[in-house]
Image (cartoon, rainbow, N blue to C red):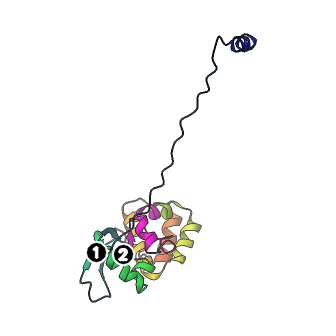
Amino acid sequence: MIDILDKAKEKELIEEKVVEEPKQEVVEEEAKEFGKDDYVKVYSLRYGNLTLRSADTHIPDTYVFNGYMDVQDVRFEVLQSLQRRSDKCLTLPWIYISDEDAIKQLRLDRAYKNILTPDKIKEVFNSNDKKLLEFINMVDDNTKKTLREIAIGKINSEEITNFGTIRLLQDELKINMKEDIR
């Protein structure tokens, strides 16, 4: 069969066409540059109320969050002000900025490595007890309080049922089984 095709090509009875795959153009999205009056979605990572305000007196904005994952649209200028003074709400972090370009512009990439986003909580509570303990020992006391409240909710709703995990959470986060668990 190949010989027949070759002979037909030589006699120019058939024409060989090379079909090229269309090139897919990879378009990299440009990072969005935020101006001071742009708004960014910000979530609270704290259990209980959190008030966010600029240290700069010329920025009167105040934002009140009413618990874990409560969301507010915050002016970028306020976030810049907090970043300039290395505010602990950004460095620990106590808030989660949902826009990756804003995180990069504020140079918070490293601080955001182990924050308590819903995905991180799922990852932590689905990990083995050794990794859970490592995470608990790595976070600050205020984050432990938030983690404690989340753990109590997960135990109460029976999302966490493993006795070893419950015992670990009880010991490390000071969960009182008689008072906290219903």
Residue at which label 1 appears: 65
Q: Residue at x 44, y 72 (%)?
A: 105
Q: Residues within 10 Å of mark 1 (few under 14, many from 20)?
A: many
Is 87 situated left or right of 6 in this image? left
Q: Residue at x 45, y 82 (%)?
A: 141
Q: Element under label 2?
A: loop
Q: CA distance from mark 1 to mark 2?
A: 9 Å
Q: Quadrant of the N terminus?
A: top right
User: Where residue 78 sits in the image (x, y, percent)?
Assistant: 32, 79
Which circle's residue, 1 or 2, is located before the other in the chain? 2
Do the CB atoms of the residues marked 1 and 2 lie less than 8 Å apart?
A: yes
Indicate whether 44 appears above or below 30: below
Q: Which residues are magenta?
A: 95-121
Residue 86, image quadrant: bottom left
Answer whether residue 132 is visible to the viewer in this image.
yes
Disc 1 residue type (three-letter): Phe
Q: Element under label 1?
A: strand
